[in-house]
């Protein structure tokens, strides 16, 4: 009996060792495959994505194969407007949703077991939905921040274009100077892409329309339409851009006024929920204690 138990234990140990070797070999092959992937033309991954990137890359071929092409096109447009098109492809974005859902459910299940709470199916499904929605919310937040940065920097870049055009340069030279001297940000990168498209042989109007279509920002659409109409009608481009810069500055001032008027309304709930109760407690506590001692 003892010999049988010893053989069984040795067999189980051999299985554990074999499983560990297979796991190490699989991880080594996965790392080698990841290094073989070429991301030279892509932007560097964020720090969090680097940790889970092997899982995302492993699911990417399945996402590319199973998801319809129409959904791929819609997701590519979302990544383009959020500035993530050179970080993730649509297939990688879909696989990121799956990995995020799996990790959210797994971490939630582990935490529930640690605190010795009942991990019901409803709670696990809720965690799964949170993991699915989280990448979408992150991309949406990036898109909104990018749109604000584009609108904020637009008057400055238009002023650069006006100054260089009035100095005697053509539109391509003015665009080159604006890209070289303008403030860093997404708008500078977009104008640099327009400049590369023009140098590659695209027409000026086509490059500008592609700028407007891939960003979907109203202010950029107005600027592009004004430049294209000025080129087609032969009117003064510097004068048109001066009017556009003045309009964008007025709009920015009006947005600032609107946000300033909204601030008191947004402060009502924090005042009522947090500040007023603490104030009443600080004022009322000495009075209550005085009455209690007098009684």
Image (cartoon, helix red, strand yellow):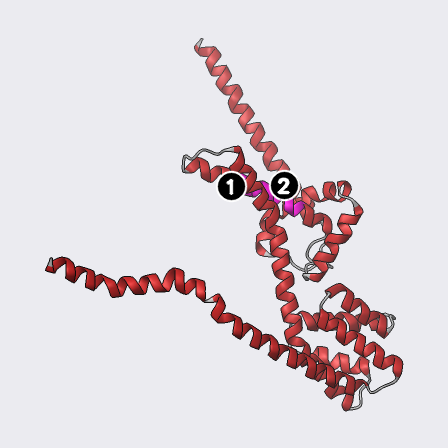
Q: Is residue 269 visible?
A: yes
User: Which mark, residue 28?
Assistant: 2
Q: Secondary structure at mark 2?
A: helix
Structural distance between the alpha carbons of marks 2 and 1: 25 Å
Q: Which residue is mark 1?
A: 107
- Can you give x and y, in whole percent of width and height, for residue 107 in the image? 51, 41
Image side of residue 185 versus residue 242, left or right? left
Marks counted in the figure total 2
| Callouts 2 and 1 close, C-beta under 8 Å | no
Image side of residue 39 versus residue 122, left or right? right
- Can you give x and y, in whole percent of width and height, for residue 118 in the image? 45, 33
Q: Is residue 154 covered in magenta?
A: no
Which span is picked out in magenta?
A: 95-108
Q: Is residue 199 visible?
A: no
- Can you give x and y, in whole percent of width and height, for residue 57 in the image? 68, 46
Q: Is residue 290 above or below residue 104?
A: below
Q: Nearer the viewer, residue 208 or 11?
A: 208
Q: Nearer the viewer, residue 62 or 32?
A: 62
Name the outermost residue toward the bottom.
Answer: 167
Residue depicted at x 72% and y 60%: 80
Q: Secondary structure at mark 1?
A: helix
- Can you give x and y, in whole percent of width and height, for residue 137 in the image? 61, 54
Q: Main secondary structure of the magenta part?
A: helix
Residue depicted at x 71% and y 68%: 217
Name the outermost residue toward the front.
Answer: 295
Residue depicted at x 56% and y 38%: 125
Q: Nearer the viewer, residue 6 or 182?
A: 182
Image quadrant in which you'd find residue 99? top right
Residue depicted at x 48% and y 34%: 119
Name the outermost residue toward the top.
Answer: 1
């Amino acid at each position: 009996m003892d010999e049988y138990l010893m053989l069984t234990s040795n067999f189980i140990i051999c299985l554990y060792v074999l499983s560990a070797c297979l796991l190490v070999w699989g991880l080594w092959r996965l790392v080698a495959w990841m290094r073989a992937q070429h991301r030279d033309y892509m932007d560097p991954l964020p720090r969090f994505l680097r940790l889970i990137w092997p899982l995302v890359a492993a699911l990417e071929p399945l996402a590319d194969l199973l998801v319809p092409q129409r959904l791929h096109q819609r997701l590519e447009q979302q990544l383009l407007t959020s500035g993530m098109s050179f970080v993730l492809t649509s297939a990688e974005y879909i696989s990121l949703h799956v990995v995020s859902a799996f990790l959210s459910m797994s971490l939630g299940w582990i935490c529930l077991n640690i605190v010795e709470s009942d991990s019901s199916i409803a709670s696990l499904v809720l965690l799964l939905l949170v993991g699915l929605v989280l990448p979408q919310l992150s991309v949406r937040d990036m898109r909104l921040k990018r749109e604000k940065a584009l609108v904020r920097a637009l008057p400055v870049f238009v002023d650069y274009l006006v100054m260089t055009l009035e100095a005697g340069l053509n539109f391509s030279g003015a665009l080159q100077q604006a890209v070289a001297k303008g403030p860093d940000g997404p708008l500078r990168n977009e104008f640099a892409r327009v400049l590369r498209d023009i140098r590659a042989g695209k027409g000026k109007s086509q490059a500008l329309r592609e700028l407007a279509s891939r960003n979907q920002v109203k202010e950029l659409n107005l600027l592009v339409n004004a430049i294209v109409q000025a080129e087609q009608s032969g009117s003064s481009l510097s004068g048109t851009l001066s009017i556009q810069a003045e309009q964008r500055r007025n709009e920015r001032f009006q947005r600032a006024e609107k946000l300033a008027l909204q601030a008191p309304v947004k402060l009502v709930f924090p005042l009522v929920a947090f500040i007023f109760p603490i104030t009443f407690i600080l004022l009322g506590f000495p009075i209550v204690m005085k009455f209690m001692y007098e009684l």
